[in-house]
Image (tube, rainbow, N blue to C red):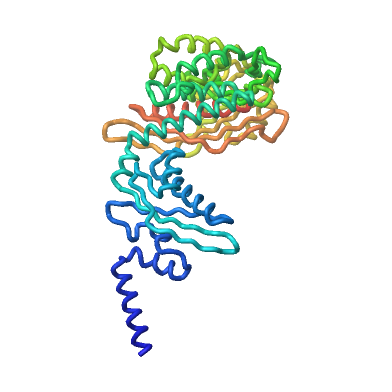
């Protein structure tokens, strides 16, 4: 008889599992093992389709305190679900009445457990799905997200000011002004009219100076300080954009830039990381606020922030330089090889390479050599009447040649760059193999084009060493 009764209970339990659905079987099993209610593992169990299930839990030394914490947990989870923090009124309504009318929320079940002398209270609530969806509409989410972003920017900006990071603060305030413009629900303290004079005052009190200039190396130090402060005058963590001109491997001038950040002393050292910076030129240092300014102008109109643009631009400083080569005269030898690897004795690329160095300010002269090895060229230079201290050897050779059906010739080439001090056998610099290719109407033109590209690359590599 007992076996039949146990079998009937088992059949009933399995039937309930099947009715509950596959997704709830795990919750029922876990609840059976842990002793916690099944909705702790699946809050949607026992809830109608037009409702959303949720639970809260609290743990405290008294049952009432645990209940209040469980109510608070429900509020926190509901706040996370709708995308913004619910006000205190919702917590009060839930803890006193067990409902939240605006969401159609009501308490479905409670469970209390005591463990190690502390009360654990669990609440199972249901929420009207339509009301919840209305509360989490795209517009609501957008507004609350935007409010949060603006608030974070302003409060973080306030912290930057206290930490002596005024330019960081200005960046934050400008971003906040852009985001909050024409958004009436943003509090006035975080909007354009309130933040604009703050930004202007902060910028008026900072200035940028150049110190320790070394024009022959294109080196200087930049300092950003503040006026009228009893605290340290250094402006820390300020982003400054350095803009200058550089030359690519084909000799074309282009604008390059790099963003520096001031240290705890409000300083950074400018030492061009681009070895292709033009030999004589200037570097402009400006506060890196261009993207914030452009976004603000797009939002409020350029005329309304014209004074701000003028103030930012007034902080720009310019550093003029003229880099000099630190090494002495250099002999240039470009060794050309034919398809079979033999030295051709052609001098065109040697002269081309020499002219690039001379035009850049180096004291360079061609050294025509018909030897195959770099060390042999060095030996010939040291036993000649030439006086150059340095020797640049560039070996170039063809790797492939293709004639297209349209009549275009294509040539691939490779090269190796070596720089010597004539007084030492060990090279000062030796590159990895470099590659190039060129197209032309004739084979000879394509070959010369590929070799010239190798010379251009060699020139760029040497500038990084021979400065």
Left or right of 125 on screen, residue 65: right
Position of the N terminus by quadrant: bottom left
Relative vertical location of residue 245 with respect to residue 314 in this rendering, above or below: below
Left or right of 224 on screen, residue 140: left
x and y percentages locating residue 142 in the rendered image: 37, 33
Residue 459, can we see it? no
Q: Nearer the viewer, residue 85 or 231?
A: 85
x and y percentages locating residue 11 in the rendered image: 32, 79
x and y percentages locating residue 348 in the rendered image: 49, 23
Q: Nearer the viewer, residue 424 or 257?
A: 257
Q: Quadrant of residue 101?
A: top left
What residue is at 35 percent from the left and 57 percent from the top?
44
What residue is at 33 percent from the left and 46 percent from the top?
104
Q: Quadrant of residue 367?
A: top right
Residue 416, can we see it? yes
Relative vertical location of residue 309 with respect to residue 47 in this rendering, above or below: above
What residue is at 40 percent from the left and 12 percent from the top?
302
Q: Nearer the viewer, residue 218 or 73?
A: 73
Position of the C terminus by quadrant: top right
What residue is at 43 percent from the left and 67 percent from the top?
31
Count up the numbered dots.
0
Relative vertical location of residue 367 with respect to residue 200 in this rendering, above or below: below
Left or right of 333 on screen, residue 326: right
Left or right of 287 on screen, residue 106: left
Q: Residue furthest right?
A: 423
């Amino acid at each position: 008889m007992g076996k039949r009764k146990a079998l009937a209970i088992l059949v009933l339990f399995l039937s309930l599992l099947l009715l509950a659905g596959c997704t709830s079987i795990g919750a029922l099993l876990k609840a059976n093992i842990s002793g916690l209610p099944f909705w702790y593992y699946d809050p949607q169990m026992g809830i109608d389709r037009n409702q959303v299930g949720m639970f809260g839990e609290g743990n405290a030394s008294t049952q009432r305190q645990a209940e209040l914490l469980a109510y608070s947990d429900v509020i926190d989870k509901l706040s996370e679900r709708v995308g913004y923090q619910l006000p205190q009124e919702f917590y009060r309504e839930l803890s006193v009445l067990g409902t939240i009318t605006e969401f159609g929320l009501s308490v479905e079940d409670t469970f209390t457990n005591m463990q190690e002398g502390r009360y654990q209270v669990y609440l199972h609530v249901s929420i009207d799905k339509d009301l919840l969806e209305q509360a989490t509409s795209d517009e609501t989410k957008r507004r609350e997200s935007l409010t949060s972003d603006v608030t974070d920017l302003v409060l973080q900006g306030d912290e930057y000011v206290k930490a002596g990071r005024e330019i960081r603060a200005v960046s934050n305030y400008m971003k906040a002004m852009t985001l909050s413009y024409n958004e009436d629900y943003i509090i006035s303290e975080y909007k354009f009219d309130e933040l604009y004079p703050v930004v202007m005052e902060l910028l008026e009190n900072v200035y940028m100076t150049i110190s320790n200039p070394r024009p022959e190396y294109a080196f200087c130090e930049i300092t950003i300080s503040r006026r009228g402060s009893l605290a340290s005058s250094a402006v820390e963590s300020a982003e400054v954009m350095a803009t200058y001109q550089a030359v690519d491997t084909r000799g074309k001038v282009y604008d390059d830039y790099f963003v520096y950040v001031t240290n705890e002393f409000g300083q950074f050292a400018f030492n061009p990381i681009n070895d292709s910076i033009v030999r004589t030129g200037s570097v402009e240092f400006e506060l890196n606020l261009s993207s914030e300014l452009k976004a603000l102008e797009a939002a409020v109109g350029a005329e309304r922030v014209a004074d701000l643009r003028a103030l930012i631009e007034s902080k720009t400083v310019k550093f003029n330089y003229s880099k000099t080569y630190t090494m002495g005269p250099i002999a240039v030898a470009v060794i050309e090889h034919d398809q079979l690897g033999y030295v051709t004795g052609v001098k065109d690329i040697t002269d081309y390479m020499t002219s690039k160095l001379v035009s850049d300010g180096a004291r360079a002269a061609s050294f025509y050599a018909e030897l195959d090895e770099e060390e042999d060229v060095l030996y010939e230079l040291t036993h000649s009447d030439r006086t150059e201290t340095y020797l640049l050897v560039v070996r170039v050779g063809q790797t492939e040649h293709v004639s297209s059906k349209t009549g275009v010739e294509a040539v691939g080439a490779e090269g190796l760059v070596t720089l010597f001090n004539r007084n030492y056998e060990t090279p000062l610099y030796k590159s990895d193999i470099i590659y190039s290719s060129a197209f032309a109407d004739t084979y000879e033109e394509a070959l010369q084009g590929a070799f010239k590209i190798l010379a251009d690359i060699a020139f760029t590599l040497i500038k990084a060493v021979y400065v």
